Amino acid sequence: MPNDFKILNQKIGLGESVQLKMDIARLNTRSKIDVPIIVSRGLKEGPCLLLIGGIHGDETNGVEIVRQIVASGLNKPEKGTVICIPLLNVFGFLSLTREFPDGRDLNRMFPGSNTGSLASRFAFHLMNKVIPKVDYCIDYHTGGAQRFNYSQVRISGNDEESLKLAKIFGSPYIVFSKSKEKTFRKSN
C-alpha cells in the first residue's frame, strides 16, 4: 500500500492512527448513526487486516473483542495496516437484535446496493469504502442470546492460505464450510 493510503476520504500516513466515522444513516429521532472505524498504520508498508465485530447486533462478544484489541493497542502494527470496526450493526446493537430496523439480516445483504434497504446500504458502503483496502479479514461472530457458538475458525475447504492462518489461531475447531450467498464472507 502506498504512502497515500486513503479511506473514507481521509489520508493516513505511515505510523498514524486515526478514528473515522462512517456516516450512513440516522435513528428515527434524526440522530446520526456513526460507525467508528479505527485505522492504524505501521511505520512500514505491508498488508491490511480488517477486524470487525457486530455484524449481528446481538453478538456482543465480538464487539468487545475488537474493542479490547483497540484498548490494549494490539491494533497498532509495526508493518502494514489494521482497520478495526468494533460495531457495524449499531441499530441491532441498540435493540439487541440480529436485524436492522428494516427486518433484514445484514449478513445476508452483501454486496449491497446504494439505493436498497437500510441493511443493503450499510453492506454497500462497507464493500465500497473499506473492503477495497483490505487483504485479510477476521469477522467475529459469537452467537447471540438464542445461539451457542463454540470457538471455531470457519474457512472454505479449498483455501490453503486460510487453512494455514486458521491453524495459527489455535482454535479447537476449524470448520470447513461453503459461504452462503449474500454473506459478508462470500463477498470478499
Image (tube, rainbow, N blue to C red):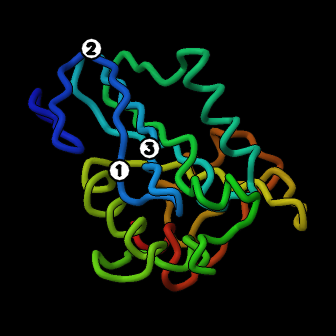
* Marker disc for residue 23: 1
Percent coordinates x, y for residue 74 in the rendering: 54, 20
User: What kind of residue is marked 3?
Assistant: Leu
Q: Mark 2 points at which residue?
A: 15
Label 2 crowd (10 A; few <14 / some 14-19 / many >=20): some
**Label total for image:** 3
Position of residue 148 relative to residue 187, above or below, is above
Find numbered disc 2 in the image and state the secondary structure of the residue it sits on: loop
- Quadrant where the C terminus sits is bottom left
Q: Mark 3 points at which residue?
A: 50
Left/right placement of residue 70 relative to residue 37 reads right
User: What kind of residue is marked 2?
Assistant: Gly
Mark 2–mark 1 Cα distance, whole angstroms, equals 25 Å
Q: Which of marks 3 and 1 is nearer the N terminus?
A: 1
Residue at image location 37% in from the left, 28% down from the top: 19
Mark 2–mark 3 Cα distance, whole angstroms, equals 17 Å
Find numbered disc 1 in the image and state the secondary structure of the residue it sits on: strand
Percent coordinates x, y for residue 183 in the rendering: 52, 75
Find out whether the residues at labels 2 and 1 contact each other: C-beta distance under 8 Å. no
Residue at image location 88% in from the left, 66% down from the top: 147
Residue 78, quarter of the rendered image:
top left
Position of residue 141 relative to residue 183, above or below, is above
* Marker disc for residue 12: none
User: What kind of residue is marked 1?
Assistant: Asp
Residue 100, quarter of the rendered image:
bottom right
Left/right placement of residue 187 relative to residue 134 reads right
Find numbered disc 3 in the image and state the secondary structure of the residue it sits on: strand
Q: Which of marks 2 and 1 is nearer the N terminus?
A: 2
Percent coordinates x, y for residue 31 in the rendering: 47, 50
